[in-house]
């Protein structure tokens, strides 16, 4: 009895210390995977799907589904943080780094607007989607990403609040001047760093 109690207590402490330092202020650890969508889940046949980078660029680029699937892929494990206060630790994703998509492009602006099927948008500084910080992901926990979570492809920008990780993403528009996306227009913070609790405009 005593032994059992001791080992359970030890395990409990271990778990807490593993988690310590990984949960940003005001967040709690969620084990499920809530769905947060501002509208209905769009369903676009893969033969009509493409991903485009345009706006202030010398040469716009786009990839069909088959072309996208040929790109070099990465496997990433990250913690994600939703502004509604749940965080999920060690989520596993696969997809293509935004660096790979932008490679060799001549960009004439420092900001991007991610746009999506269904009309959702979110704005990001270019610096927050380059340098190994953002991916297009199509696989979650080893399986094709569920439509309700953004399949076939969503953006993953795990170092910012999860509303920046646009579901059903179809492209990035490079912008010379920053513009606000959907939630940013409705009072959410323009940047959204969970470690600084950049939740609402004015935080
Ligand atoms: N296209 C689109 N992307 C979106 C949203 C949305 O409504 N539409 N919601 C955002 C918000 S507020 C969050 S918290 C996450 C939720 O992702 P999930 O539903 O996979 O948990 O997606 C983000 N990306
Ligand atoms: Mo959210």
Image (spheres, rainbow, N blue to C red):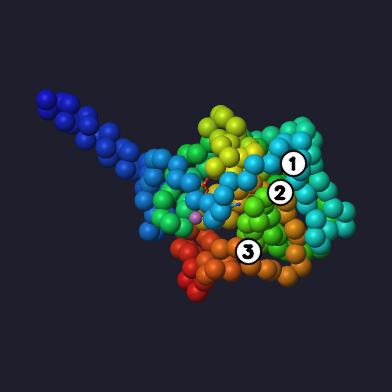
> Which is nearer the eye, 46 or 102?
46
Residue drawn at (47%, 39%), measured in percent from left and top?
Answer: 90
Secondary structure of the residue carrying numbered label 3: loop
Q: Is residue 6 left or right of residue 155?
A: left
- Is the residue under label 1 in contact with that under label 2 (CB below 8 Å)? yes
Judging by the rendered image, the residue that carries numbered circle 1 is: 49
- Establish if 198 lies above or below 6: below
Quarter of the figure with residue 110: bottom right
The answer to whether mark 2 is within 8 Å of ligand 1 is: no
Q: Which residue is mark 3?
A: 181
Give the left or right position of residue 188, taking residue 54 as reference: left
- Which circle's residue, 2 or 3, is located before the other in the chain? 2
Q: Of residues 102 and 5, which is closer to you in this image?
A: 102
Is the residue marked by circle 1 packed among few (<14), some (14-19), or many (20+) residues within 10 Å? Answer: some
Residue furthest to the bottom = 202
**Mark 2 crowd level (few <14, some 14–19, many ≥20, 10 Å Cα):** many
Q: Which residue is mark 2?
A: 170
């Amino acid at each position: 009895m005593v032994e059992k109690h001791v080992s359970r207590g030890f395990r409990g402490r271990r778990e807490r210390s593993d988690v310590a330092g990984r949960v940003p202020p005001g967040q709690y650890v969620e084990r499920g995977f809530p769905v947060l969508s501002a509208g209905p889940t769009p369903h676009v046949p893969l033969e009509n799907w493409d991903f485009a980078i345009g706006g202030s660029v010398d040469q716009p680029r786009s990839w069909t589904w088959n072309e996208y699937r040929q790109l070099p892929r990465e496997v990433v494990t990250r913690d994600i943080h939703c502004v509604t206060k749940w965080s999920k630790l060690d989520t596993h994703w696969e997809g293509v780094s935004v660096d790979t998509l932008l490679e060799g492009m001549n960009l004439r602006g420092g900001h991007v607007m991610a746009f999506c099927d269904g009309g959702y948008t979110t704005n990001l500084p270019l610096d927050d989607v380059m340098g190994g910080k953002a991916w297009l992901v199509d696989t979650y926990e080893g399986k094709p990403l569920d439509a309700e979570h953004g399949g076939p492809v969503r953006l993953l920008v795990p170092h910012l609040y999860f509303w920046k990780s646009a579901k059903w993403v179809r492209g990035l528009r490079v912008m010379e001047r920053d513009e606000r996306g959907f939630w940013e227009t409705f009072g959410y913070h323009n940047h959204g760093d969970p470690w600084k609790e950049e939740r609402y405009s004015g935080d």
